[in-house]
């Protein structure tokens, strides 16, 4: 279920901005040094991450409000303004956001739910600026109900039952039962 949502977001981003970016892929988590290094080699790029989920109380079935973030990363040698606004040679972060935000908002994932925009964040940092990139994050919420726990009735029938039991003291031999069940 979590991966299905991630895949649906990636597919939608591919549809709305695929021809303008070098990479659209998932991230294992939040931005760190390793993530930044990988993104620098493939800008402009779109990166999708499941960020978190807040539990919504229900005694019968687990429900949560999941949070997914779509990161937009651009880089220009011409400076920070071009990273945001683009130029005649390369797309800017604002242009990508203007397509991604409405493209993902309202996206319905069959059997899971519909994504709704929560926030758009400018993730500016001196570190990103020194590396020549800008990073924005568009966060979405999605109410989801987790599947019920495993139902033992869905397991395949078994034909052999085997068990070892300790009867008596530690020095006594184990009792072994094995039964072949007719099908």
Image (cartoon, rainbow, N blue to C red):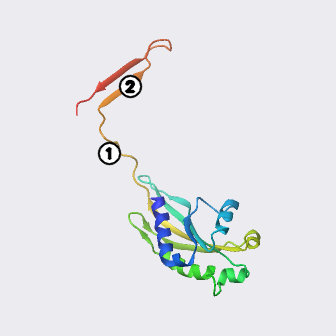
Left-right relation of 81 to 28: right
Q: Residue at x 40, y 48 (%)?
A: 149
Residue at (52, 68) in percent of width and height: 141
Mark 2, residue position: 163
Q: Earlier in the sequence, mark 2 or mark 1?
A: 1
Label drawn at residue 24: none
Nearer to us in this view, 151 or 90: 90
Instruction: Residue 103: give x, y in percent of width and height.
Output: 49, 77
Q: Residues within 10 Å of mark 1 (few under 14, many from 20)?
A: few
Q: Residue furthest left?
A: 183
Q: Nearer the viewer, residue 14 or 52?
A: 14
Determine crowd level at label 2: few under 14, some 14-19, many 20+ residues with C-alpha closer than 10 A: few
x, y percent for residue 14:
50, 73
The quarter holding residue 95 reads: bottom right
Q: How many marks?
A: 2
Quarter holding the C terminus is top left
Residue at disc 2, secondary structure: strand
Question: Which residue is at the far bottom?
Answer: 88
Q: Is residue 174 above or below residue 95?
A: above
The N terminus sits in image quarter: bottom left
Lateral position of residue 124 relative to residue 26, left or right: right
Give the image quarter of residue 82. bottom right
Q: Which mark is residue 154?
A: 1
The residue positioned 65% from the left and 84% from the top of the image is 85
Q: Is residue 57 left or right of residue 73?
A: left
**Seen from this angle, which residue lies furthest top?**
171
Residue 153 placement, left or right of 99: left
Q: Is residue 158 above or below residue 37?
A: above
């Amino acid at each position: 279920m979590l991966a299905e949502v991630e895949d649906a977001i990636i597919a939608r981003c591919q549809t709305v901005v695929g021809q303008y970016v070098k990479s659209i892929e998932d991230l294992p988590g939040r931005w760190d040094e390793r993530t930044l290094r990988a993104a620098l080699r493939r800008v402009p790029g779109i990166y999708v991450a499941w960020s978190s989920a807040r539990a919504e109380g229900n005694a019968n079935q687990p429900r949560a409000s999941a949070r997914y973030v779509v990161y937009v990363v651009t880089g220009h040698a011409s400076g920070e303004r071009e990273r945001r606004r683009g130029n005649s040679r390369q797309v800017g972060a604002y242009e990508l956001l203007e397509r991604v935000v409405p493209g993902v908002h309202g996206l319905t994932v069959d059997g899971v739910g519909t994504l709704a925009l929560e926030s758009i964040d400018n993730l500016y940092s001196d570190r990103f600026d020194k590396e020549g990139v800008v990073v924005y994050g568009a966060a979405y919420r999605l109410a989801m109900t987790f599947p019920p726990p495993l139902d033992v009735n869905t397991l395949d029938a078994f034909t052999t039952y085997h068990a070892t039991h300790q009867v008596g003291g530690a020095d006594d031999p184990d009792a072994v039962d094995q039964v072949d069940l007719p099908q």
